[in-house]
Image (cartoon, rainbow, N blue to C red):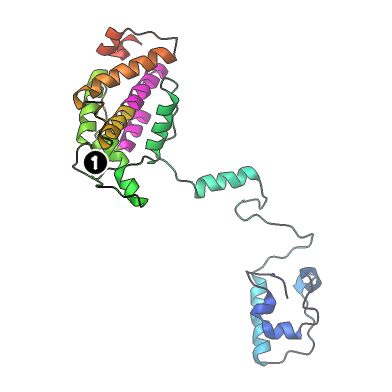
Amino acid sequence: MSFNWAGDYALAEVYPCLAVLDVDIGCKVADKWSDGGWRWNWRRQVEGGVSAGQVVELGIKLTEERCVEGLDFWYWQIDPDGKFTVAGTRNWIDEKVLPSAMCSTKWCSWVPKKVNIFVWRVLWKRLPTQLALKARGIGVESVLCPTCSDEEETVNHVISSCSVASSIWDLVTRWLQVTRNLGTGSDSLFQWLEGERMTVDKKKLLEAIVWSTMWVLWRFRNDKVHEANLMRKDTLFDFIQDVSFCWFNSRQKKLRISWVDWLQNPFYFM
């Protein structure tokens, strides 16, 4: 009774009167289990009082436990088979502990690695926005968006619903002649891309341009925060066309599109 047979405590702690009466308090489970039932060896007959009540409670408690003949073994509770495996534990952590995103993480080889990492941070809401910095205890002058000063700066706002970002996305969709859903926030952008039906190359090109647009919007925001004044709002769309064109032509060899054709609509020539 000195071991944790059932529950988180030793039976001797839960039933102290019976622990005093037990002849072999340090025995194993097998010593008390015989022919499908429990066998107790008390120092004297238990006739009544607290001891009798604890005998009844002990019997009820042990009926809730399943005992079988055989060697003892460890049971891993988070696995349906009760067996510990690294893969099973990793999957459990992924499902129960790690956060989940509405869309799968994307990796586009037609943009630089730094842009892919940035987009991953957008997807998981890991950008150091003003609101996020304040939540971490970092002193900021204001949590308002430094670009528009209309709303609190969140990832969804700075990437999609900010007035500057919204106007840029309108220019991009008109340039590519695609229809974006009316949802607001960065999540709606990823859902829109997931739902687009087009050829593999066109889909990859669309992702590259969307990734480039997100990166330019965040770069413009940082320029505002640090007062670098390196970028002007009226040149953002031109810069998106320029940088996406350079990345596209330098990172793949199969497709070639001229600068003039790119400015018209790159989808026409794929």
Numbered range of the magenta stretch: 186-213
At 27% from the left and 22% from the top, the residue drawn is 178
With respect to residue 82, does 149 lie above or below? above
Q: Main secondary structure of the magenta part?
A: helix
At 80% from the left and 87% from the top, the residue drawn is 43
Residue 22: percent from left, percent from top: 77, 82
Question: 207 and 58: which one is in front?
Answer: 207
Q: Is residue 140 visible?
A: yes
Query: Was residue 198 drawn as part of the magenta stretch in this picture?
Result: yes
**In the rendered image, which residue does mark 1 sit on?**
145
Tell whether 245 sits left or right of 60: left
Tell whether 95 sits left or right of 35: left
Which element type, helix, strand or loop, lies under badge 1? Answer: loop
Q: Is residue 197 visible?
A: no
Question: 129 and 226: which one is in front?
Answer: 226
Amino acid under label 1? Cys
At 30% from the left and 16% from the top, the residue drawn is 242
Query: Was residue 152 drawn as part of the magenta stretch in this picture?
Result: no
With respect to residue 97, does 215 lie above or below? above
Tell whether 171 sits left or right of 112: left
Residue 56: percent from left, percent from top: 66, 82
> How many numbered marks, from 0 up?
1
Dividing the picture into quadrants, the one containing residue 31 is bottom right
Dividing the picture into quadrants, the one containing residue 264 is top left
Q: Quadrant of the N terminus?
A: bottom right
The crowding category of the residue bearing disc 1, from other C-alpha atoms within 10 Å (few below 14, some 14 to 19, many at least 20), is many
Residue 256: percent from left, percent from top: 38, 8
Question: 88 and 260: which one is in front?
Answer: 260
Residue 263: percent from left, percent from top: 26, 12
Dividing the picture into quadrants, the one containing residue 237 is top left
